Amino acid sequence: MIPSWIIIGAVTFFVALGSFLITPRDVKWFAHLSRPRWLVFEPLIPIIWTVIFICGAASANVVWQKNPGGIITWLLMGLYLLVEMITVAYIPVMLRFRSLKAGEILGLMGLISGVVLGVCVLPISGLAGLLLLPYLVWTPIGTYTTDELKEINPQDA
């Protein structure tokens, strides 16, 4: 039998590959946007998201280990998957539609679904809830940054 952490890690990895739906033309649009002066951490964003995805997968594995195969566990795995899909969709959707508003909406959807996930997971495992904290801290920062980009680049809102 394949260990759950391998399956959860593989699903996380393959869903994250969805970010490769970005075309060079889309990236050029985003690269030309004006940025707030305080946005000095932009080069660290890929590392930050890698850590967040690893923590999310670890959280899912902790929840799975508490009650493997239970109906509530499967529903939570679906919620973990939904949160990751919303998160991964943020960049490709925003770039494809060249709409910062679309990115902001997905950021808010990710935050809300992440909070719901955290509330559902916390009674099952404090560790699983703690592992969701990076997502719950970073998502509002990313959403706020997108909102600031909208303010600075109203023509691309």
Image (tube, rainbow, N blue to C red):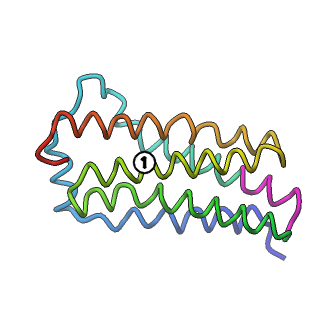
Q: Residue at x 65, y 46 (%)?
A: 55
In the figure, residue 89 lies in which quadrant?
Answer: bottom left
Residue nearer the viewer, 131 or 122: 122
**Residue 73 forms part of the magenta stretch:** no
Q: Residue at x 43, y 45 (%)?
A: 46
List x then y, in percent, for residue 143. Answer: 39, 40
Given the current orientation, which residue lies at the most extreme left position?
155
Q: Residue at x 47, y 52 (%)?
A: 109
Q: Does the magenta stretch mainly form a helix, a strand or a loop?
A: helix
Vertical comparison of 147 with 31: above or below: above
Crowding near pointer 1: few (<14 within 10 Å), some, many (20+)? many
Name the residue carrying label 1. Answer: 107
In the figure, residue 60 lies in which quadrant?
Answer: bottom right
**Residue 64 forms part of the magenta stretch:** yes
* Secondary structure at numbered mark 1: helix
Image check: 125 left or right of 129? right
Vertical comparison of 19 with 31: above or below: below
In the figure, residue 153 lies in which quadrant?
Answer: top left
Which kind of residue does numbered mark 1 sit on? Gly
Q: Which residues are magenta?
A: 59-68
Image check: 105 left or right of 27? right
List x then y, in percent, for residue 93. Answer: 32, 61
Image check: 56 left or right of 123? left
List x then y, in percent, for residue 61. Answer: 76, 57
